[in-house]
Image: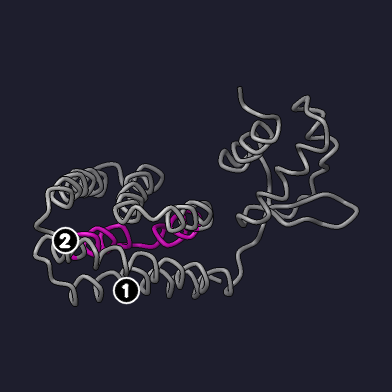
């Protein structure tokens, strides 16, 4: 059975993801916990967890509001992604001849084709992001480091928000596909230097777009 803390956490995440909460509005913990039918203690625990994950900010004596991304948020997020994904793509390239790496590359190729299909048809940013982050999640999980996976998941909301903002720019979806393809091709050939450079480029380009937007 799901704990009350987890119920409150998932409920708040769903409200945020479905854009039921508006930026600049201050929300009462008491009111929302009553609507959910959960006491304030587990609800407050969920709020603090979402603060740590960058979803919301607490307004003392008032409640909480959605977190507005800053330039510092953008820079730190892409620094973390560069460190994690740079390491992971290099490890995949180093072990490209193994059965496990071969299986992963087939899965990544399928996701790559899904992204390219969206690029050529609907150009739905939300659908594209879904496959995009499946691609990156598989890369991270390949090294089987639970701390890497935990950090990556903790930043997921922030990363997806930044991705949606950058993908709204003309041709960014096309460029993103090309960058993914470059990373995938470098992993397939086992080119360690090339895959690292391609991964960093894939981080630095959207970072620049996000910083300019802010």
Q: Is residue 16 magenta?
A: no
The structure's colour scheme is one colour
Look at the image and give the residue range highlighted in magenta: 159-182
Residue that protrudes farthest toward the right in the picture? 61
Which mark is first along the chain, 2 or 1? 2
Q: Is residue 28 above or below residue 189?
A: above
Q: Is residue 179 magenta?
A: yes
For image coordinates 48% across by 53% down, the residue present is 150
What residue is disc 1 on?
A: 200
**The N terminus - image quarter:** top right
Mark 2 Cα-neighbour bin, 10 Å: few <14, some 14–19, many ≥20: some
For image coordinates 41% across by 44% down, the residue present is 126
For image coordinates 42% across by 62% down, the residue present is 166
Q: Is residue 197 left or right of residue 166?
A: left
Q: Which mark is residue 47?
A: none
Query: Element at badge 1?
Result: helix
Q: Looking at the picture, how far across and down is residue 172, in whole percent? A: 33, 62
**Magenta stretch mostly in which secondary structure?**
helix
Q: Which mark is residue 95?
A: 2
Quote the CA–CA distance across marks 1 and 2. 20 Å
For image coordinates 72% across by 46% down, the residue present is 47
Q: Looking at the picture, how far across and down is residue 147, in whole percent? A: 46, 57
Query: Element at badge 2?
Result: loop
């Amino acid at each position: 059975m799901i704990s009350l803390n987890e119920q409150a956490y998932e409920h708040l995440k769903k409200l945020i993801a479905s854009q039921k909460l508006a930026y600049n509005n201050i929300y009462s913990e008491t009111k929302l916990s009553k609507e959910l039918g959960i006491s304030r203690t587990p609800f407050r625990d969920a709020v603090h967890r979402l603060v740590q994950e960058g979803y919301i900010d607490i307004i003392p004596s008032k409640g909480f509001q959605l977190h507005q991304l800053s330039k510092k948020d953008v820079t730190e997020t892409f620094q973390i992604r560069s460190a994690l994904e740079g390491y992971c793509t290099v490890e995949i390239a180093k072990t490209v001849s193994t059965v496990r790496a071969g299986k992963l590359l087939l899965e990544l190729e399928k996701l790559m084709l899904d992204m390219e299909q969206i690029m050529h048809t609907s150009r739905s940013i939300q659908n594209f992001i879904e496959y995009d982050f499946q691609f990156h999640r598989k890369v991270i999980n390949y090294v089987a480091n639970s701390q890497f996976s935990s950090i990556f998941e903790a930043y997921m909301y922030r990363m997806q928000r930044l991705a949606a903002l950058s993908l709204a720019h003309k041709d960014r979806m096309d460029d993103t596909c090309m960058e993914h393809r470059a990373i995938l091709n470098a992993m397939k050939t086992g080119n360690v230097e090339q895959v690292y450079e391609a991964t960093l480029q894939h981080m630095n380009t959207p970072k620049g777009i996000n910083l300019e937007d802010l």
